[in-house]
Image (cartoon, rainbow, N blue to C red):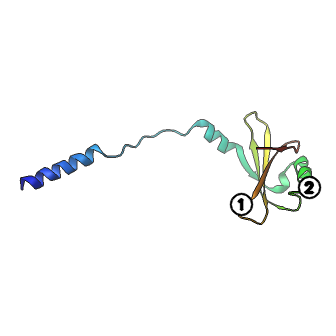
Amino acid sequence: MKKSILMSALLLGGLAITSPKISATPLPTSYEQSQQENVKIDADQLPEAVKNSISADESVAALSIAEAWKMTAPESKLHFKVIFDNGTEEKLSKTYDEAGNEIKE
């Protein structure tokens, strides 16, 4: 009887010592800001310079646009990420500035 009481006490004591600690840490502010600065737009809302660059680029001119994103860069400049549907699961994406110049990542 004493052994079962002692074993129960040790088991409960061990559980109390090893309980997980949960701490509330806020997310970094830069992460929150980057999520707020990316806005999904329609393909027809892309600037004319970006549309002209896409039509002039032979590698993507024939592809349809699956998604378009308007993003604010850290320097408060606008960038546009365009995701093309190339018929595979892994879509092709390119990023352009407001003047239609492709930004190499």
Image quadrant containing the C terminus: top right
Q: Say which residue label 2 marks.
A: 55
Image quadrant containing the N terminus: bottom left
Specify the farthest residue to the bottom. Answer: 87
| Whole-percent x, y for residue 3 in the image | 9, 53
Q: Say which residue label 1 marks.
A: 90
Point out which mark residue 51 bears. Answer: none
Label 2 sits on what residue type? Ser
Q: Is residue 89 left or right of residue 15?
A: right
- Which is more toward the observer, 32 or 59? 59
- Which is more toward the observer, 43 or 54? 54
Q: Is residue 3 above or below residue 89?
A: above
Total labels: the figure holds: 2
Label 1 sits on what residue type? Glu
| Whole-percent x, y for residue 14 in the image | 24, 47
Q: Is residue 98 left or right of residue 35?
A: right
- Sequence order check, earlier mark of 2 and 1: 2
Q: Which residue is depicted at the point 74% across and 59% down?
A: 91
Q: Label 2 vs label 1: CA separation?
A: 21 Å
| Whole-percent x, y for residue 104 in the image | 79, 44
Which of the 4 image quadrants contains residue 17?
A: top left
| Whole-percent x, y for residue 87 in the image | 77, 66
Q: Residues within 10 Å of mark 2 (few under 14, many from 20)?
A: few
Specify the farthest residue to the left. Answer: 1
Q: Which residue is depicted at the point 48% across and 38% down?
A: 25
Q: Which residue is depicted at the point 12% across and 50% down?
A: 6
Which of the 4 image quadrants contains residue 67?
A: bottom right
Element class at badge 2: helix
Element class at badge 1: loop
Q: Are marks 2 and 1 in contact (CB under 8 Å)?
A: no
Q: Residues within 10 Å of mark 1 (few under 14, many from 20)?
A: few
